[in-house]
Image: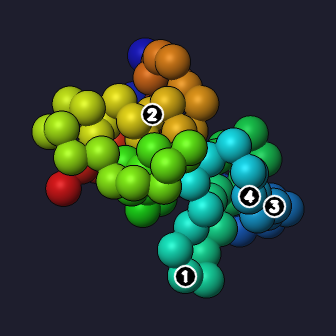
Amino acid sequence: MPDEINVQIDDMPKQSINTSGAPQPIGPYVQAVRAGDLLFISGQLPLDPTTGTLVRAGVRAQTRRVIENINKKEVGDVVSILLF
């Protein structure tokens, strides 16, 4: 494993991503931003995409819902997850 990986994204073209397959953002936000091979996703709520309701069954179910909403069955390629 390398000691450090540096990625410069300032010069990469950035693409805003919105999909109808996940809950729509609340407010003037996009669901994700792609910069090169990196995908940045932030502020995801555990919303059921079919009903639009918030999952309230605890942090495990909420985390699972968010991961399913971003269409990841495994988190092997995920660099960081921050829950609060």
Tell me the distance, in whole angstroms, between the alpha carbons under discs 3 and 2. Answer: 21 Å
For disc 1, the marked residue is 27
Secondary structure under tag 2 reads helix
For marks 4 and 1 on the same chain, the one whose residue lies earlier in the sequence: 4
- Which part of the image, by quadrant, shows the N terminus? top left
Cα–Cα span, label 4 and label 1: 13 Å
3D distance between C-alphas at marks 4 and 2: 16 Å
What separation in Å lies between label 1 and label 2 (alpha carbons)?
Answer: 21 Å
Numbered circle sitting on residue 18 = 4
Kind of element beneath mark 3: strand
Which percent across, then down, holds residue 37?
A: 74, 39
Between disc 1 and disc 2, whose residue precedes?
Answer: 1
Q: Is residue 73 visible?
A: yes
Tell which residue pokes out farthest to the left in this image. Answer: 58
- Mark 1 crowd level (few <14, some 14–19, many ≥20, 10 Å Cα): few
Query: Looking at the rendering, which quadrant does residue 70 occupy?
Result: top right
Q: Is residue 77 left or right of residue 43?
A: right
Question: Which residue is identified by label 3?
Answer: 15
**CA–CA distance between discs 4 and 3?**
10 Å
What's the residue type where badge 3 is placed?
A: Gln
In this rendering, the answer to whether 50 lies above or below 2 is below
Relative side of 51 to 28, left or right: left
